[in-house]
Each structure stands twice: as C-alpha cells, then as structure tokens.
Amino acid sequence: MIIKPRVKGFLCTTAHPVGCEQDVRNQIAHVKAGGPIEGGPKRVLVIGASGGYGLASRISAAFGSGASTIGVFFERPASGARTAS
C-alpha cells in the first residue's frame, strides 16, 4: 500500500509505519539523553497509549524512570484504501 499524506487542518490523518517507528526511537533517545528521572514511578498504567501524550508518558516512565508499563488503546486495522489508526 502506498501511503500518501492527508492532512486536515493541523492533523495528519495518515502515517507510514517506518516513520512512526523512527519517531518512537527518537523520543526514547531524547528521554535517555536526559538521564534518569529521580523518584519516578515504578509501575505505570497508561490509558490511551497509542500516541500523543499517552505514548510520550509511557516512554518517559519506561525509559526515564525504568518503570514497568502497560499501555491500553483501541486501534482499527488497515482495510482497503484506509491505513490503520
């Protein structure tokens, strides 16, 4: 499937899986570069962890505090001409 950018206002409604993976890797590297978070949580449940603040919170907790994390989210699979959510 060829994924073409589709933007509504300031929100991109399509994303390439390889680009998403690299973005997460960049966020992890950024958190690790900041050093450990003193007194951070040890166990974290993030509801809505697929993107935005939820994903950033999970990355910060896991890679900044060394916390065990669980992320909960609801996604739809790709179908026809539509990418997954």
Image (cartoon, rainbow, N blue to C red):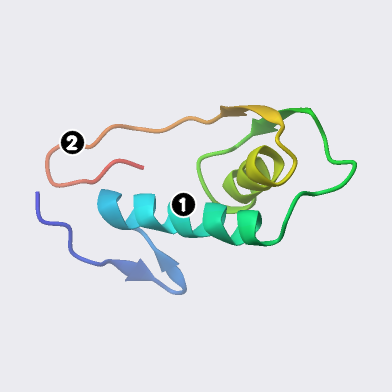
Instruction: Depth check: give the residue in front, 65 or 81.
Output: 65
Disc with the residue nearer the chain's start (2 vs 1): 1
**Which secondary structure lies at badge 1?**
helix
Q: Amino acid at mark 2?
A: Ser
x%, y% of residue 8? Answer: 39, 69
**Which secondary structure lies at badge 2?**
loop
Disc 1: CA contacts within 10 A as few (<14), some (14-19) or many (>=20) = some
Residue tagged by mark 2? 79
x%, y% of residue 54? Answer: 63, 44
> Which numbered mark, 2 or 1, is in the foreground of this view?
1
x%, y% of residue 11? Answer: 44, 66
- In the image, farthest residue toward the right: 39
User: Which residue is pictured at 17% across the width and 57% down the height?
Assistant: 3
x%, y% of residue 52? Answer: 57, 53
Residue tagged by mark 1? 24
Q: Amino acid at mark 1?
A: Val
Residue 14 tag number: none
Q: Is residue 24 left or right of residue 5?
A: right
Q: Is residue 59 visible?
A: yes
Instruction: Depth check: give the residue in front, 45 or 31.
Output: 31
